[in-house]
Image: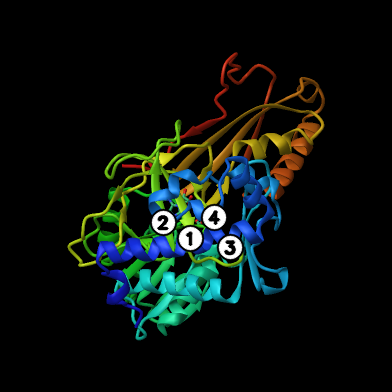
Amino acid sequence: MIWNEAKECMPREEIEELQSARLKKLVDRVYHNVEYYRRKMQEVGLEPMDIQGIQDIEKLPFTTNEDLNKAYPLGLLAVPRSEIIRIHATSGTTGKPKIGAYTRRDIDIWAEGVARCMTMAGVTRDDTVLVSYGYGLFTGGLGAHYGAEKIGAMVIPVSTGNTAKLIGMLIDFQATVIACTPSYLLHIAETLEKENKIDQIKLKCCICGAEPWTDEMRAQIEKRLHIKAYDIYGLTEMMGPGVANDCDAHAGLHIWEDHFLPEIVDPATGKHLAPGETGELVITTLTKEGLPLVRYRTHDLTSLSYEKCSCGRTMARIQRFKGRTDDMLIIKGVNVFPTQVEAALLTIDGTTPHYLMVVDRVDNQDTLEIQIEVEERFFSDEIRSLEKLADKVRSVLKTAIGLNARVKLVEPDTLEHSQGKTKHVVDKRKLYD
Ligand code: DLL
């Protein structure tokens, strides 16, 4: 059992002392082991001794997506490459993936983080956990898998892509816990209802995350499947799922402050905001060895609460997410930037960079239609050339963004052309409360 009262209910002064000690060590480590950080610190006249604790955090420069892009793939490693035993990746703003690189200890701490999250949701070694996050470069599958195994639960690594098989496993093995995205879980619920199989499942809870979801979605999941729904947060750059999770109080997600130092800043000025105020979540990894990040700007909008929770835990709580400060979309759990679509279209003869992404949710499944203006000649030619172009666009986009999109080719000047900031996305889903 991973419930660790000594850690999760530490008095705040002790948490802060631990964070200060770990921050000092981290700064020393990145200064001496990572050229990139050393230069960034030197640019603002900082030396490791200037950071004596978390009270000095604001002196340190932020780390941004652009920094990760420049350092791609492994320029920010703080250990020799031979100590890295695994990488994960997710899409980045300019098409370069964002990388997670892990030492053996990083993998252990990640598993413990997820295990703590799952324990918070009541998972024990007697449970059977069906994992239906994607396995592979995405952190969801293996992250949830190692966490559940750490608890000693029995894991069914179904991954994504085959709802019929998943339902079979759910019933045959009488799984008690399911870990997947909330929208997919609603789709599973719908399928179970249609097939009259709700009575055949034994689920008690779900660990859902990887995309924003509303209280209404939570209520629907709980009601339709007769389970308790828990929210898990994380990002590849930090390690993956398991950075934070909500407890039975559902009053925010406890962030594991012994490993992650959270801050909320004004996205425009970068200045600290007070507890309760909404701004951009910035996280410093306090214990990561492989690819530590100092003051990483997550682009996720939320607020922090430091009050002791009714569950007894003292670790700060991230409140429900309010949105993102960049244009990243999460479609079927996949992170997609409009710039990736644009870059892909530019490689295809006959298309133009005038496009509109229409995102919707039909039967609880995300849909993506991309409307693209193509050159006039495709409309005067025989219909086959238009169809051929559509096939090509579909396959190039699938490679670029990792999703099957419905492609609609339209004539020049069909879409709105703005002289200012062109709108490239219409998102019809209700993602935030
Ligand atoms: O989505 C890791 C993960 C896997 C979390 C499985 C939970 C469960 P990335 O693909 O790097 O990592 O995407 C990270 O997804 O910055 C948020 O914008 C969003 N996100 C993740 N969890 C939540 C959540 C994984 N519970 C990005 N609520 C983050 C809202 C979430 N947004």
Location of the C terminus by quadrant is top left
C-alpha gap between disc 4 and disc 1: 7 Å
Instruction: Give coordinates of residue 258: x percent, y percent.
Output: 39, 66
Above or below residue 268? Residue 398 is below
Q: Which residue is mark 4?
A: 48
C-alpha gap between disc 4 and disc 2: 11 Å
C-alpha gap between disc 1 and disc 3: 9 Å
Q: Which residue is mark 2?
A: 53
Q: Earlier in the sequence, mark 1 or mark 2?
A: 1
Residue 211 visible in image: yes
C-alpha gap between disc 2 and disc 3: 15 Å
In this rendered view, identify the residue nearer to me: 213 or 381.
213
Residue at the extreme left of the image, as rendered: 310
Q: Earlier in the sequence, mark 3 or mark 4?
A: 3
Residue type at tag 2: Gly
> For the residue carrying disc 1, how many other residues have a C-alpha within 10 Å: few (<14), some (14-19), or many (20+)?
many
Q: Which residue is mark 1?
A: 24
> For the residue carrying disc 3, how many other residues have a C-alpha within 10 Å: few (<14), some (14-19), or many (20+)?
some
Q: Earlier in the sequence, mark 4 or mark 1?
A: 1
Residue type at tag 4: Pro
Above or below residue 12? Residue 167 is below
Residue type at tag 3: Arg
